[in-house]
Image: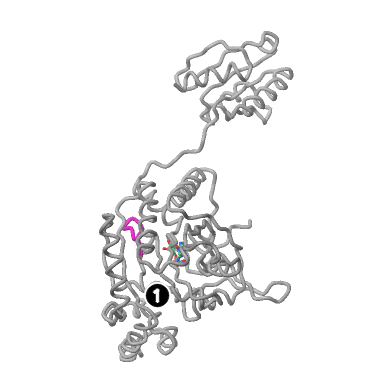
Amino acid sequence: MIKKPRGTEDILPKDSALWNLIETTAKRVCEKYGYKEIRTPVFEETSLFNRGVGETTDVVQKEMYTFNDKGGRSITLRPEGTASLTRSYIENSLYANPQPTKLYYLISCYRYEKPQSGRLREFHQFGLECFGSENSAADAEIITLALDFFNELKVQGLVLNINSIGCPECKPKYNQALKEYFTSHINDLCDTCKSRLEKNPMRILDCKSTVCHEIAKSAPRMIDYLCDDCSREFESLKKYLDTVGIEYKVDTNIVRGLDYYTRTVFEITSDALGAQSTVCGGGRYNGLVEELGGKPTPGIGFALGIERLILILKNQGTDLPQETVPDIFIATIGDKADMFAQKLVHDLRNLGYHAERDLCSRSVKAQMKYANKLDARYSIVIGDDEVDTNKACIKNMNDGSQYETEITSEAISKIIEKENI
Ligand code: HAM
């Protein structure tokens, strides 16, 4: 039997109500902050991610789904959204609009990682990007938006960790300090990190190998090397967060796994997640637009993993939304009633009700069993007599009470509405 590829998940109808709630909440919160939805292709030219995400990152070196299409072009399934949005921002001249440009997305992403709880090969992100503002009020605004979103979904126990990883002015000094530190441990580093030492020693800080991770714990900290501008911006971010009462921890170990970050980086973690404890990550990328061929333009954004969010909601026992149930089930006996029910169900649906009828030629007893299984709120049994008199009993399936009613969509609707009150 053919099975789904490793690291992918089917989102079944029983979970769709929750996915819909997450997506509509994301959209509603984004609208409040002036973010507009954008949709970009699932696949892009590979060079976009090589240049955007960075040649020395785990994502580019080990995790991309890259293939040649039938025209011989190298194509990659997007491992994340920021590079794609930056391409789209430049390609569609979105910089010509009043700045900043605030965009959000709900996307699937693809990374060839070792699957485990909270880590998939196809996963989904809710993310956003703000282009054109260098002000740390924008950093504070997107962090506030992320927490507002989690709050609306009643997610508890989250911790916000922030850090600054500097800019092209202060990073070289720091990189030099890192190089010296890691060179003294070179024999213990994994092969990938040995090759990173010259090109990009910061990448060693987020290597997933346990030995490299241990060594990285005592490495020099970027925060001690920040230039005056970066320090000032970091202080100002903290003040903006304080002013709206957002609690945070400064975690100098956050470096993030993608190369485009400058200055602010942050992660939101949950202890309901186990090893993959980061549900949301983001930061500034003031050099990315220029790196991808646009004019120098600052940017900041975040993305959160929807599967990880769902794990938190399930682990913390949140009341999850249920599948919708039929307002009414129309059971039938005989051919005349069958045709009548087809029209009645149609009319009720036109009035906006979730109406169902039997589609599997069941006996009337089996139809009622089925209505029970569907958890229908009301049911009506229609036979020849009911069609002739245009009257039948409508039954409230919760308390068993029955009323005689005309079997028109308007009369049935009145009963459902009256009981709703
Ligand atoms: P990221 O940290 O690579 O950042 O991913 C963001 C979130 O996506 C993670 O915190 C996690 O919840 C989820 N995620 C990542 N990989 C997986 C996986 N294999 N399985 C399940 N969930 C996963 C970015 O992608 C950046 N583009 C975020 C950003 C936007 N920075 C600035 N703007």
SS class, disc 1: strand
Residue drawn at point x = 61 percent, y = 63 percent: 41
Quadrant the N terminus occupies: bottom right
User: Residue 396: within the magenta?
Assistant: no
Residue drawn at point x = 50 percent, y = 61 percent: 98
Q: How busy is the neighbourhood of tag 1: few (under 14 within 10 Å), some, or many (20 plus)?
A: many
Q: Is residue 45 left or right of residue 187?
A: right
Residue 334 x, y percent position in the rendering: 71, 18
Q: Is residue 120 left or right of residue 152?
A: right
Residue 105 x, y percent position in the rendering: 51, 57
- Quadrant of the picture in which ligand 1 is shown: bottom left
- Residue 162 against residue 418 in the figure, above or below: below
Image quadrant where residue 187 sits: bottom left
Residue 421 x, y percent position in the rendering: 44, 21
Residue that badge 1 annotates? 262
- State the extent of the magenta-drawn residues as a range: 267-274
Judging depth in this view, the residue of 300 and 119 nearest the camera is 300
